[in-house]
Image: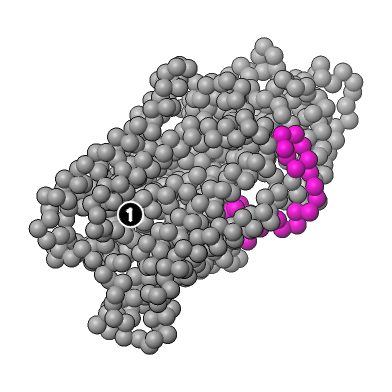
Amino acid sequence: MPPYQNLNLRSTRSVWRFFGEPGHRFRQGVVMPWLLTGFAIVYYSLYVTAGLNLGGEGGTAGVVAMRLLAGQRPIADTFLGYNVLWFFPVAGLFEITGPNYLVLRWYFFAFCTASGLLTYFVVHGYTRNAWYSAIPAVMVILVPGMLFRNYMPFLGILNAFLLTRAFAMERASQWKTLAWMLAAGLGLGVTFLFRIDLGIFCTLIFLGLTVLFPFGYQGDFLRRSGLALVGAGGGLVLAWAVHLPVWNDARTRGYDRAFLEQYTGWIGMISSEFRQQMADLSDNDGPANPAPAPAPAAESTPQSPSTVVPVPAKATEKPNADSWEDRGALVRAPVSDIFFGRKWTHKSFAISTYLPLLISVISIIAGGIGLLLALICRDPAEKERFLYPLTVLGCALTLLPQFLFFRPDTPHLSEMMVPYLAALSLFVWAAGRCAFCASGQGRRVSAGLFAIVCAAAGAIYFSHAFPKDSSGSIAAKKMASHEFRALNGVNVKVRDREAVWLAGLRDAVLRHSSPGEYVLCLPYSPMINFMTDRSSPMHNLYVDNTVGEAEFGGYFQKLVSGTPPAVIVVDERRINRNEISRFRNWAPQTYAWLWKNYVFVGRYSKNEVFVRPDKCPDPVVPESIEVSD
């Protein structure tokens, strides 16, 4: 137990009981993870069949996994956008069960459960209080983050778990410390194979903790330096070794160069994006919203569109080539929404966007000062007290860029907040104990206020995210009572108004296409391909208004030359929440070509279905099933 757990509280006995009596802590720590696991299984089973998002990433995961099963090579034959472990396990599951939508959902709910358990272990490792640690864990289980992207919060909290145990927690046995360092390196390798940018950010934290490891101890610098060197070196070797099976497969199948170029490309993209952000901040006449990171994804945009065709040098339809609309980014909520938002959901989202930034700055400054003093005074207990929550905060902030600079919406906020809730819980605990134990009145008041602000930030976020199905919560079950069936195990409950147009869309695609024929979905509706078991001719399943009309027109002509797709589905939603991102606005010539060369057979909600003329020999009366927003 860390020495600071033995602080002599000056409050009443009831306060001490709240923080946990030592005699009961062990039993609570053993039982609680099992209770959380059972709770997660019951909770997710309540809505595992609820909802179907045609523009969600479940379709991408399913389609890409089916391509890999068919023998296509990652990156070379089919665009991934992420790294190979994002899809390889899904392909493995489908090889056993066959392509199945519900299997896919349960697979990602397993990651949600793991994130909740890791949140518990992270908080419990610092507080040693099972009931308190269960609070953020339950919040994470209830709001696990955008479904089908649950790797992201899982990787954030996984690295927080491993790095705190490897570098922040003091252990009597150096062999155990070394084992955790090696495990942290192993975690880095796995992180890279899922998402390269997170791997880069977490590696920087890993190296920073390695440098700090020897400091803050009396007469033990050389031994700890050697341990840090061996542990960090061994960890990085393991991170490399994890790649060997994939690298061998890549060399055997001829996608090794493309696999390697992901890593070098990401480093360049991160540095380029950083320079762009700095330029935007220094240019008063620059775009109103910072430029998006080039590869982090949206709920309906899992891949970087720039890999489809080059981003145009100019586009006549767009007044400003540097505007955030042209970059495919979403505009951030204005700070004024905190005070003047029309609804609570607007206010709570703005608060949840900017309050964590303020808390992070305060925590880094105050925690950094405390850590520096602990290192100077060579106080191991105080070093752990400050380094542990700072490490968790750093891992949480690895998910910040994709949310703040590219897709500032509830789905991506919910991803970042999974590890950030763990950090908030640690801040509340540390500040709360300081408020009870500090000798000076000023320190007690300031610590108490900070604890209240951190607790309020978590509560406000939860009140915003829990009622929204885009955050992965049970809100998806709301009014989802009508059964909808399609191919590849799609057997879900949707709203009555959705069931009508979904059935019409499904039937239109199946009626006018045969197995093996292409169905082209623009700009991004991969679930249509998955639920109808029809292939897409697109290398990258996603495209949007960041691609110019001229460049996309040439790419589109390649798609429809040779054997044209039997069916083309155009989703006319505002994919980037602005009018220019409607397909007919940013690709008007292609849209006009469709009306001239294909047969329009129906509009289902916002999805317009065009069929190759030879698939419609008889005159067609277009069907229209309109659904209001």
Q: Residue at x 63, y 58 (%)?
A: 43
Q: Nearer the viewer, residue 274 or 593?
A: 274
Q: Where is residue 277 in the image (x, y as percent from the top left)?
A: 37, 44
Q: Nearer the viewer, residue 211 or 342?
A: 211
Q: Where is residue 199 in the image (x, y as percent from the top left)?
A: 38, 40
List the single residue furthest toward the left: 219
At label 1, the amino acid type is Arg
- Marks counted in the figure total 1
Q: Which residue is drawn at 77% across and 47% down?
A: 498
Q: Which residue is drawn at 59% across and 61% down?
A: 39
Q: Nearer the viewer, residue 138 or 57?
A: 138
Residue 381 seen from this side: yes
Residue 553 falls left or right of residue 50: left
Helix, strand or loop at disc 1?
helix
What span is in magenta? 467-491
Q: Position of residue 208 (x, y in %)?
A: 25, 48
Categorize mark 1 by other alpha carbons within 10 Å: few (<14), some (14-19), many (20+).
Answer: many
Vertical arrangement, residue 452 with respect to residue 40, above or below: below
Q: Mark 1 points at which residue?
A: 165
List the single residue furthest toward the bottom: 12
Vertical arrangement, residue 278 with respect to residue 70, above or below: below
